[in-house]
Every structure is written in C-alpha cells, then in structure tokens.
Image (tube, rainbow, N blue to C red):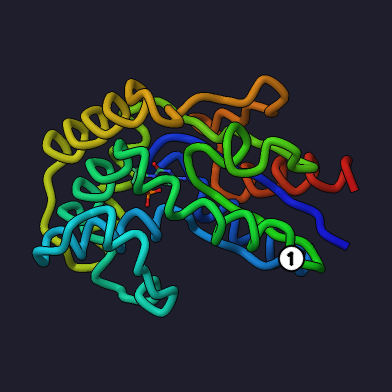
Amino acid sequence: MSFAVAIDGPAAAGKGTISRAVARHFGFAHLDTGLLYRAVGRAVLDGSGPVSAARDLDPAALENPLLRTPEVADAASRVAVIPEVRAALLDFQRAFASRAGGAVLDGRDIGTVICPGAEVKIFVTASAEVRAQRRLDELLGRGIAAEYAQVLAEVRARDDRDSSRSAAPLRPAADAVVLDTTDLSIDEAVARATEIVAARR
Ligand code: DC
C-alpha cells in the first residue's frame, strides 16, 4: 500500500535531515527532489540545455556529491523556474510517491503540485538567519570555504526566486502542518515530524 509524506520548505530549514529520519523511522523510501533540480543545474553549468537535461536525466546522476555546492544550488534554483523542466521531472516524482511501502519526498512543491493527495504534508521553515547559520556550519563541516553574510544573501536570493516564480512557487499547501524549527534542536524537530506522521497512519 502507498503512503506519501510530503515535506516542503525553504533552503536549509531542516527538511533533508527530518525527511531522512522520518523515512528511516517508518521504513519508507526517501527522495530529495532538490537533487533532481541540482542535477539539471549541474548539466546546464556543463553546457547542456535545461529542458533536454531534465528530459534525459539519469537517476544515477543524483548520487553525485558535487551536486551539494552553493554554485549548483543557485543553478538549480534558476532552472526550477522553467515550467518545461518541472513538467519533465513530474512523472518520476509521482511514481516514487506512489510506490508500495511508503515514501517521503522533500522539496518545494510536493504537497501543492506533485502529491496534492499526500497522506501527510509538513511545511518545515525557520528564520533566514538561522537557516544561513546552519548552511554555513554544514559547508564548513564539509571543508567548503564560506562566510555568513554571503550565505545569508544566497539563502534570501533563493527564497525570493523560489517563492516568486509563477511555476509551482514555494508555499505551504492549505492542509500542511507548519513546523517552525527556528528554536528547535534537530532532535526536537525530528520528534515533532515523527509524531505528525504517526498520528496519520
Ligand atoms: O532543496 P534544494 O536546496 O536541494 O533545492 C535546490 C533548488 O531546486 C531550490 O532552490 C529550488 C529547486 N527545487 C524546486 O523548485 N522544487 C523542488 N521540489 C525541489 C527543489
């Protein structure tokens, strides 16, 4: 039986960590849909056209650790405004969501566009300052040089682009539970998300 958990929210709000933990807890599969846009963004940086890169995307490309750089994040946010790119990535995401045994998908438009009928929808958010600090810690932890002011500016630029685009803008679904992690530890945020999912099972 399928059971879809949609976890949306802005960059660095904690979606990824929460989604992985929820998937592990319930034994569900997990798809970080940002990686699809990052893989297309990476291909565009390498000279491909965005729409053909999205249509020809090989899921094996999602394993590339080089997708997690600020340069690729920016490229992803730019290709994500193109409706044909989003359309080309739709079937893969919907098929993943309806797989037997349950699935967690995290992104920007899972509860609004990809899985409007998801059994659980959570919108994870936090202040831009807290998200920038978390992203900075993550980058430094991975040995990538970064500065707070620059990371904060990138977080805000991505928020603006992701929220103001006309194709599937970032916004909570009407029936999503909003989980603000500004003042929560990651363990507290995971516990809260797990409770929300458990209550709907
Ligand atoms: O979650 P992320 O930071 O890896 O996402 C990178 C970009 O991809 C993000 O700025 C916007 C886009 N994206 C999207 O438009 N829709 C999704 N479901 C996931 C990501």
- Mark 1: which amino acid? Arg
Residue located at (57% from left, 25% from top): 172
Q: Is residue 103 left or right of residue 84?
A: right
Identity of the residue furthest to the bottom in this view: 60
Considering only vertical position in the picture, is 168 above or below 24?
above
Vertical placement of 29 versus 169: above or below?
Answer: below
Q: Is residue 109 above or below residue 70?
A: above
Q: Position of residue 19 (x, y in %)?
A: 60, 54
Q: Nearer the viewer, residue 14 or 160?
A: 160
**Is the N terminus in the top left, top right, bottom left or bottom right quadrant?**
bottom right
Q: Residue shown at 77%/61% (left/top)?
A: 102
Residue 57 versus residue 135: which sits nearer the camera?
Answer: 57
Which percent across, then down, holds residue 105?
Answer: 60, 53
Is disc 1 placed on a helix, strand or loop?
A: loop
- Name the residue carrying label 1: 99
Instruction: Tell whether 10 sits left or right of 19.
Output: left
Q: Crowdedness of circle 1 by 10 Å Cα count: few (<14), some, many (20+)?
A: some
Count all numbered tags in the image, as a single digit: 1
Residue visible at 45% across and 55% down in the picture: 89
Quadrant hosting ligand 1: top left
Along the horizontal axis of the image, is 175 left or right of 111?
right
Give the x, y percent position of residue 115.
66, 43
**Residue sitting at x 52%, y 37%:** 109
In the rendering, at what x and y percent does residue 49 appear?
18, 57
